[in-house]
């Protein structure tokens, strides 16, 4: 295995591990009813927005 | 004149029997229970004038005008309202105005919990969310029909250097217990002790809107009334003496137009003034119900000093939730029996039931105040409908309403398809060019395969449908903002009723064409739990926008003519399956009595380009966010499962068949084969569990993997058209494509929708939904495929 192939393999498996963890995290989070901002789930997304207009 | 005396003098006339165009006065609402209470609160009180406007195209429900609002009632419900045409009989209604009484309220420190909290309360569709968006800079969804907001939304604004939390609550006609959102508002106020209430009222419909104000007044919380849509009141030629009205009601009133921001700063300043004043002992103003009821309120209030006047009145009204608050109190039994005695005394004295008496008095109070402060435009003839309803002559016309509804639906799909095809081609070419470029500049290897086949093939396959998604949501936004949604519910109510559904279910269904999650939450506007369950369980059959990329791909690839109609037929199959499911459920496992249908038909409003663009942009952003997150991650995983394990000397076709994904697909192939699917299609529907767009991205990855390295780059559509089985036959043809679309339409919803079902209905129903929808999907695809291939 050349150095370049090894490096590519490490990068790909790193990306794959991140993708797997992300999907797992998203699935658990969604199943627990905690949707993201802008996900369209209708949950209270604006609560994270602490700044509004100034009057 | 008492009700009994009236009955002796007149043969009983029911609203149900009144002809179109007739104006009559309400004598009483018969029956009992929550629906009666709702009618009373919507203005069907003794002496109120009702005009019969029109029958729905299928003859039921009927549109009535009361207190300037257009209300839809079914014949069976209108038969509960006794009416008379003797005009002068109830002219004593305004005598019910007894003015206000003052209650001394102890000062409170608004910063006791370190947060200044103001809540928005008002009737549905009065502009609360428009104000909320204007003040907080949020982009929460607004629409010209009731029930858009079903949850609380929180945002922030600053005024005079102070930071304030603003909470948008669902619209409600009153604070009783008729529907879940009413209870939600009531419980929210009780549990969160807001520092002030900002009551938004529609300035053009004060009589009905101020009914809720009278209930809020009794809660003894600092309140400001914002007279929204003030521009429309001015345009109508009516004149309201705000100063006099404020004095008569004992509440601060400030004019405002939320959608353009006029008067918003003044409203917020008035709220801050009210909060500042509440720090000291103040005189709070309440509706004066007359000596008898006031004595009862004072007496009972002394027995339970911790309860506010609103709750004490509710205890006298025999409201179960208010009575429950007495639990744990030492003198609870004494209070209950005392309240029961008082109720009897009041009912005896007024010769009516307590619900009617309180509603009459509240409306009497509002009418009395309006008689003093509101001067209607003398040029407008009595009985004229307000502007904004003229389109109903066409859109709810007996003969034209249903064809127009169908044409609008068809137009929406046809334009989505045809207009969206141009930018789609540009994006497709861009992605293909990008894929080729990456392929040329990167050295051969695993990383290049991941980027070209996994990421570009997967994400790119879904990204190309962005224009269609934007166009579809643009249309939905126009329908929502114009007020047509409520008309659609009015038109189809009879059909919905026949299949055991409530007319109001139509609105969650329409939202379901966008996304199932907010649609499931929108069922909170349905009062009956069984109605809600039937609606929740059938919403996933309304094809959400995430399934659209799969249809667009397959329709474009395998149907050359009538593409809009093919697409529409898929949606219609979904509606049909939902209807059949609803009929079966409402006659078996969710059997229940017919639920009443009372709905307000809002005036038509011109949709604004700004709102439609914001809605479109927000949906486009969500779509792109999904691309960059869950679809990207899923594409990478699907690619890896189709790439490993590696075997030397195999063709790409053999490689993918021997991969983990190939083995998984082969294992489920016997189940999907009778539907005309190959293993790649079987795997695609499985991965769609995370998000339905992943069906397409999986196919993008799997079919890109089949491409030979030296083959000329083609789009996913072309790959599907040319994909062949080992025996040389084409994998796809129009029958297989339609069978696949039917399966995608009907099988289990994505995990986010299942989580929403769990929240609203529980795990039991989630399990039922997964098994039922997948079973139905398999059966219908099977029947279609087997019959179609034999014809």
Image (spheres, coloured by chain):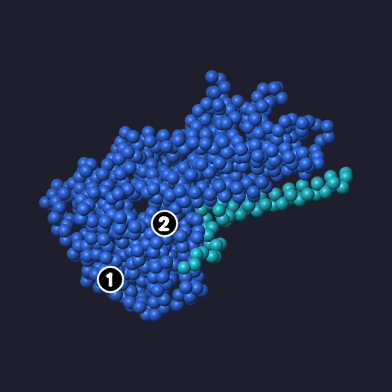
Chain colours: A cyan, B blue
**Residue farthest to the right, as pictured:** A2
Check disc 1 and report its element: helix, strand or loop: helix
In the rendered image, residue B492, in percent from the top left (x then y), is placed at 37, 39
Binning the other alpha carbons within 10 Å of mark 2 as few (below 14), some (14 to 19) or many (20 upward) gives: some
Residue under the point 69% across and 34% down: B703
In the rendered image, residue B369, in percent from the top left (x then y), is placed at 24, 65
Q: CA distance from mark 2 to mark 1?
A: 27 Å
Residue under the point 65% across and 24% down: B730
Residue under the point 42% across and 37% down: B408
The disc numbered 2 marks a residue on which chain?
B
Nearer the N terminus, badge 2 or badge 1? 1
The answer to whether residue B41 of the structure is visible from this angle is: no
In the rendered image, residue B387, in percent from the top left (x then y), is placed at 30, 49
Check disc 2 and report its element: helix, strand or loop: loop
Between tags 2 and 1, which lies in front?
2
Report the side of B330 relative to B647 (left or right): left
The answer to whether residue B618 of the structure is visible from this angle is: yes
| Quadrant assignment for the N terminus of chain B | bottom left
Q: What residue is shown with label 1?
A: B247
Report the side of B260 relative to B138 (left or right): left
The disc numbered 1 marks a residue on which chain?
B
- Asked if disc 2 and disc 1 are in contact, CB closer than 8 Å, the reply is no
Report the side of B741 relative to B211 (left or right): right
Q: What residue is shown with label 2?
A: B259
| Quadrant assignment for the C terminus of chain B | top right
């Amino acid at each position: 295995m050349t150095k370049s192939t090894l490096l590519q393999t490490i990068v790909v498996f790193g990306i794959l591990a991140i993708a797997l963890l992300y999907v797992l995290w998203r699935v658990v989070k969604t199943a627990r009813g905690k949707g993201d901002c802008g996900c369209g789930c209708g949950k209270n997304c604006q609560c994270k927005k602490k700044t509004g207009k100034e009057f | 004149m008492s009700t009994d005396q009236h009955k002796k003098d007149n043969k009983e006339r029911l609203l149900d029997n009144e002809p179109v165009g007739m104006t009559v006065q309400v004598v009483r609402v018969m029956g009992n229970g929550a629906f009666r209470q709702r009618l009373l609160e919507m203005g069907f009180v003794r002496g109120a004038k009702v005009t019969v406007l029109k029958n729905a195209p299928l003859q039921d429900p009927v549109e009535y005008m009361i207190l300037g609002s257009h209300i839809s009632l079914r014949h069976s419900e209108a038969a509960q309202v006794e009416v008379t045409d003797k005009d002068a009989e109830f002219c004593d209604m305004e005598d019910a105005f007894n003015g206000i009484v003052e209650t001394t309220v102890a000062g409170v420190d608004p910063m006791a919990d370190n947060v200044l909290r103001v809540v928005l309360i008002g009737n549905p569709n009065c502009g609360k969310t428009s104000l909320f968006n204007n003040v907080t800079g949020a982009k929460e969804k607004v629409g010209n029909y009731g029930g858009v907001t079903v949850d609380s939304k929180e945002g922030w604004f600053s005024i005079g250097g102070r930071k304030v939390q603003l909470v948008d609550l669902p619209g409600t006609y009153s604070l009783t217990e008729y529907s879940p959102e009413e209870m939600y508002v009531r419980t929210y106020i009780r549990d969160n002790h807001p520092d002030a209430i900002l009551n938004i009222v529609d300035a053009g419909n004060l009589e009905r809107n101020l009914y809720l104000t009278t209930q809020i007044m009794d809660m003894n919380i600092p309140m400001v009334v914002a007279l929204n849509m003030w521009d429309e009141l001015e345009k109508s030629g009516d004149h309201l003496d705000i100063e006099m009205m404020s004095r008569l009601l004992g509440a601060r009133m400030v004019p405002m137009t939320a959608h353009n921001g006029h008067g918003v700063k003044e409203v917020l300043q008035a709220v801050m003034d009210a909060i500042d004043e509440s720090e000291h002992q103040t005189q709070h103003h309440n509706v004066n119900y007359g000596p008898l009821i006031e004595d009862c309120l004072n007496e009972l209030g002394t027995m339970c000093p911790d309860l506010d006047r609103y709750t004490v009145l509710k205890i006298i009204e025999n409201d179960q939730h208010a009575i429950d608050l007495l639990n744990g109190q030492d003198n609870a039994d004494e209070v209950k029996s005392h309240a029961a005695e008082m109720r009897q005394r009041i009912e005896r004295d007024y010769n009516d039931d307590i619900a009617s008496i309180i509603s009459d008095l509240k409306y009497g109070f509002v009418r009395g105040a309006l008689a003093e402060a509101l001067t209607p435009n003398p040029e407008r003839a009595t009985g004229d409908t307000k502007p904004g309803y003229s389109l109903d002559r066409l859109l709810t016309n007996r003969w034209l309403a249903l064809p127009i509804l169908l044409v609008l639906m068809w137009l929406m799909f046809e334009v989505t398809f045809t207009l969206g095809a141009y930018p789609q081609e540009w994006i497709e070419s861009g992605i293909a060019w990008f894929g080729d470029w990456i392929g040329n500049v990167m050295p051969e290897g695993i990383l290049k395969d991941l980027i070209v086949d996994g990421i570009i093939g997967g994400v790119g396959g879904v990204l190309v449908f962005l224009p269609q998604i934007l166009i579809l949501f643009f249309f939905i936004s126009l329908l929502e903002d114009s007020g047509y949604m409520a008309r659609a519910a009015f038109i189809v109510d009879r059909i919905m009723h026949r299949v055991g559904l409530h007319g109001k279910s139509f609105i969650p269904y329409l939202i379901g064409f966008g996304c199932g999650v907010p649609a499931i939450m929108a069922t909170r506007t349905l009062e009956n739990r069984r109605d809600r369950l039937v609606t929740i369980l059938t919403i996933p059959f309304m094809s959400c926008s995430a399934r659209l990329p799969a249809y667009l791909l397959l329709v474009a690839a395998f149907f050359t003519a009538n593409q809009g109609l093919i697409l529409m037929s898929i949606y219609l199959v979904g509606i049909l399956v939902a209807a059949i499911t609803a009929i079966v459920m409402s006659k078996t496992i969710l059997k229940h009595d017919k639920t009443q249908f009372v709905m307000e038909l809002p005036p038509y409003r011109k949709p604004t380009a700004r709102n439609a663009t914001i809605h479109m942009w927000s949906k486009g952003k969500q779509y792109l966010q999904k691309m960059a997150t869950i679809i990207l991650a899923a594409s990478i995983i699907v690619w890896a499962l189709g790439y490993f394990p590696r075997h030397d000397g195999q063709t790409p076709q053999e490689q993918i068949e021997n991969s983990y994904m190939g083995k998984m697909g082969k294992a489920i192939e016997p189940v999907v084969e009778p539907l005309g699917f190959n293993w790649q299609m079987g795997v695609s529907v499985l991965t769609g569990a995370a998000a339905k767009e992943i069906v397409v991205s999986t196919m993008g990855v799997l079919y890109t993997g089949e491409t030979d390295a030296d083959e000329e780059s083609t789009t996913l559509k072309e790959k599907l058209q040319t994909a062949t089985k080992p025996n040389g036959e084409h994998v796809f043809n129009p029958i297989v494509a339609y069978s696949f679309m039917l399966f995608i339409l009907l099988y289990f919803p994505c995990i986010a929708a299942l989580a929403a079902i769990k929240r609203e209905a529980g795990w039991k129903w989630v399990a039922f939904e997964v098994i039922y929808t997948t079973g139905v999907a398999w059966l219908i695809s099977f029947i279609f495929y087997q019959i179609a291939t034999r014809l």
